[in-house]
Image (spheres, rainbow, N blue to C red):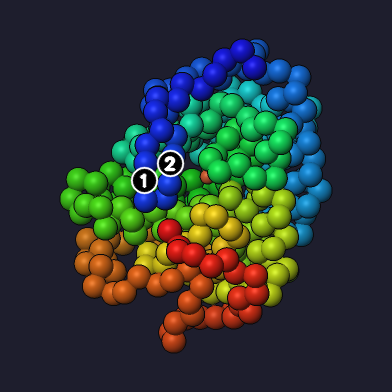
Amino acid sequence: MNTQPRRVENIATDRGVIPMYATGVVEQPWGSYSRSDHEIWATLFRRQRELLPGRACAAFLANQQALAMSEDAIPRFDALNRHLRAATGWELVGVEGLLPEEVFFDHLAHRRFPVTWWIRRADQLDYIAEPDLFHDLFGHVPLLMNPVFADYMQAYGQGGLRAQREFGDEALLNLTRLYWYTVEFGLIREPAGLRIYGAGIVSSKGESIYCLQSSAPNRIGFDLERVMRTRYRIDSYQKTYFVIDGFEQLFEATRQDFAPIYPRVAGARAVPAGSVLAHDHVINRGSGEGWPEGTDA
Ligand SMILES: [Fe+2]
């Protein structure tokens, strides 16, 4: 590839060193994708599309097809935007990589979804620590075609902006957990059984299988405040997945005023990623087999 993402600096955080990118919106440099970039897209696309029928939720599979994503080439953001605008009024904007929270929230609040323009290397097919084009496009974009999920994403962005103005760091951490356990790693109950809707799962071969078939993780019914208290893993498959009954449940939960919720959550103890609580609606209690040692994020 001719172009390089503009990585501004690496910053040290409590989760290790993470790259910080320039925050501006960039034109997708479609013409500069190499043959190998398109091949990486094709390999990942094929692999996940073979795996996901019977695992991903119906809305994800149908909408990905409606967007006309295929293995033929890396999709053009412009072409996807024509479908998205017509369906839900969302649009994709190209970005260099992970964004600071305030920039990210502002995009979502205005129904813009930031997509990393570059794709991973061939030696990163199974795992990459930061979001790339495959994760963002393949994983996140199909559900933006769903009107209820699309509204949830915007409400999330609006809630994030408000939390920054009025409620501070603890509230932002609660929102990060909510995003993690829904948008990235959420499961949904469908008539035929549990299905995946989280982008972090559908873009990962290993976790697409593990989250539904392994007896190790907990699967627990979604509860907003429980999720906001729950720590998570960034270095392994999740120890706990939260299950929604439908996207309406998600949107309804976030329609309420969060102002009284933050102090309640702050007053309760944070829950370790693998714990099961007395009042949980437990769908499966995990065996914990193979869970890594070490601290949750
Ligand atoms: Fe993501």
Q: Is residue 63 visible?
A: no
Residues at badges 2 and 1 in contact (C-beta under 8 Å)?
yes
Residue positioned most to the left: 166
- How crowded pointer 2 is (Cα within 10 Å; few <14, some 14-19, many 20+) is rated as few
Amino acid type of the residue tagged 1 in the rendering: Thr
Query: At which x and y percent is residue 297?
Result: 43, 58
Tag shown at residue 13 = 1
Q: At numbered mark 1, what does the secondary structure look like: helix, strand or loop? A: strand
Q: At numbered mark 2, what does the secondary structure look like: helix, strand or loop? A: strand
Query: At which x and y percent is residue 11?
Result: 37, 37
- How crowded pointer 1 is (Cα within 10 Å; few <14, some 14-19, many 20+) is rated as few
Query: At which x and y percent is residue 71?
Result: 77, 32
186 vs 40: above or below: below
228 vs 21: above or below: below
167 vs 68: above or below: below
Report the residue marked by disc 2: 17
Q: Is residue 128 left or right of residue 47?
A: left
Query: At which x and y percent is residue 16?
Result: 43, 46
